[in-house]
Image: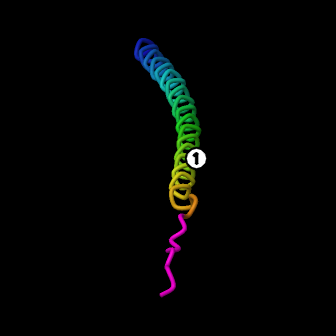
């Protein structure tokens, strides 16, 4: 009876240590996932800003093509 009780106590202690190990592992995984999420968020914000800057630059360059000096199309017509 005493041996069975000691065996059960050993098994419960092992189970308890497994639970502690997996809780620590889960906490480390959660911390890594949250850190990764923050890095992805910052990278996405940076990419969004870069896309907006490039887009605005392209619009400005495209506008400069069409807003250049206009050539006069007056014809020198001779009165007849």
Crowding near the residue tagged with mark 1, few <14, some 14–19, many ≥20 C-alpha atoms within 10 Å: few
Q: Which secondary structure is most common in the magenta stretch? A: loop
Q: Give the vertical position of 6 relative to 16 (above or below).
A: above
Residue 12 lies, with reference to residue 2, above or below; the image says: below
Q: Position of residue 9 (x, y in %)?
A: 48, 18
Residue 1 falls in image quadrant: top left
Residue 77 within the magenta-colored segment of the rendering:
yes
* Residue 9 forms part of the magenta stretch: no
Q: Nearer the viewer, residue 46 or 31?
A: 46
Q: Residue at x 51, y 51 (%)?
A: 58
Give the percent coordinates (x, y) of residue 60.
57, 54
Residue numbers of the magenta segment: 71-80
Q: Nearer the viewer, residue 50 or 60?
A: 60
The residue nearer to you, when weighing 1 against 45, is 45
- Residue under numbered circle 1: 53
> For the point 49% across and 79% down, which residue is it?
77
Taking the spot 51% from the left edge, 56% from the top edge, the residue there is: 65
Residue 26: % across, % down = 50, 29
């Amino acid at each position: 009876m005493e041996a069975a009780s000691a065996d059960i106590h050993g098994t419960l202690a092992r189970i308890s240590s497994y639970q502690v190990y997996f809780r620590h592992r889960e906490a480390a995984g959660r911390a890594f996932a949250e850190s990764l999420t923050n890095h992805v968020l910052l990278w996405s914000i940076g990419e969004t800003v870069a896309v907006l800057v490039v887009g605005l630059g392209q619009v400005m360059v495209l506008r400069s093509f069409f807003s250049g000096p206009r050539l006069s199309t007056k014809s020198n017509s001779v009165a007849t």
